[in-house]
Image: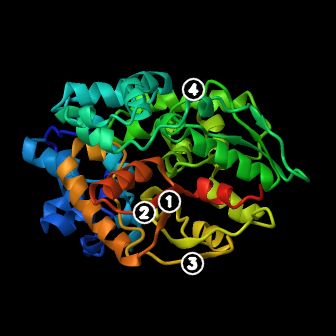
Amino acid sequence: MAETKSELRPAVSLDDETFELLMDCIHCGFCLPTCPTFALTGDETDSPRGRLYYMRLLAEGRIDPNESVLTHLDRCLECRACETACPSGVRYGFLSELVRAQLAKQGKGPTRHSKLQDFLIRHILPYPNRLELLFLPLRIAQSFRATEWLNNIPALSRTISMVPMLPSRQWQRLPQTFVAKNERKMRVGLLTGCVNSVVLSRTNWAAAEVLAAAGCEVLVPSGQGCCGSLLAHIGYLEDAQKLAKKLILTFARYEPLDAIVVTAAGCGSFMKDYGHLFADDIHFADLARKFAAKVKDFCELLDEIGLPKPLKPLSGHVTYHDPCHLAHGQNIREQPRNLIRQVPGIEFVELSEADWCCGGGGAYSLLQPEMSDAVLDRKIANIKATQANIVVTANIVCMMQLWYGIRKHRLDIQLMHIADFLRAALPD
């Protein structure tokens, strides 16, 4: 006999179809050894199946969302490693975001303890111009190599330590078109992103130049911004929808496009799910689905069309960290490795637990710094064991988290986005 929801008033409201998704979990435990937070605490309530059970109890009205329950839900990194391990195909990420969204509306989201963090994540980080203003003191301090005084401000020290040397603002002004070299294979749009466009603006240039060298005409739409993933992960789905709609309409002005290329794994994973995000919007659903169908990760597209040849040799021992939302969210694992191995002169060293989370997790490092640091320490230990002098990855949050870890552990390691790594191998 099928189980049904309780008649008690639930803390979160799920329709019957969504509630049945919770029942897909058969409590087999395959997710446990893949969960970074369970590995740290050994507590069942810090595991995917434990959190799914909490979600079920909340939906049935059998428990209240008290501080203990919320703490265990908040500790989830949303890395989705459990989805890769799950034999039942439980849609953990979808369910978690849906429950977080309802709790956030009740003032019980991950940012409930800090109005400052809530304001920063909702109203600053998704907007490049505002973020640039926030980073202005840091930019000035970096130009004079005098960032130590900023590190003495407790509220800023960890955040400041996550930001690499900011590129000159001239790198933020990308041309609207990068002409394809030789024969044009595709016409693509490039997402510049929100935090990406400030912290990794040179990487956006590098990505466009590599794509152009590979035969793509690259269009960089003006007026684009955040894809909405950052806000969706902490429960602000309606805010995320507004940003997503603006982005879709911005790219629509540049059609026809063969693909929309993304250099941030978290953004790409979220954008590929726009069809579901707007499933209930009869006026926008079709446009959202068509947009999502064109989204390609930078590595995914380049592996399909091929790197330009010849590439110039680089030197070094290179390892690769899988961003969670690339490996688990999009099942893109071999493509970046294929691209890296094609660069002559380097020695590729596989990283142990390469697809284990680094602890970045969107805004997780700001909201759960102790847990984030503990997860990061495991990643850094594995990186050190490779004896690589170059670490390559493919996501803005991973870049910032690993940069923080490298500085914290005083390692002599160069950290590169894969777009910058491949750009360095283009002939002069």
**Of discs 1 and 2, which sits in the foreground?**
2
Query: Disc 1 versus disc 4: distance between alpha carbons?
Result: 28 Å
- If the image is split into quadrants, where does the N terminus sit? bottom left
Image location of residue 24, percent across then percent down: 33, 64
Query: Disc 4 versus disc 2: distance between alpha carbons?
Result: 39 Å
Q: Earlier in the sequence, mark 4 or mark 2?
A: 4
Query: Disc 1 versus disc 2: distance between alpha carbons?
Result: 13 Å
Q: Earlier in the sequence, mark 1 or mark 2?
A: 1
Residue that carries the numbered disc 3 in the rendered image? 347
Q: Earlier in the sequence, mark 3 or mark 4?
A: 4
Judge whether 51 appears above or below 336 on screen.
above
Image location of residue 403, percent across then percent down: 38, 52
Residue that carries the numbered disc 4 in the rendered image? 246
Q: Which mark is residue 413?
A: 2
Residue that carries the numbered disc 1 in the rendered image? 393
Q: Amino acid at mark 3?
A: Glu
Q: Amino acid at mark 2?
A: Ile
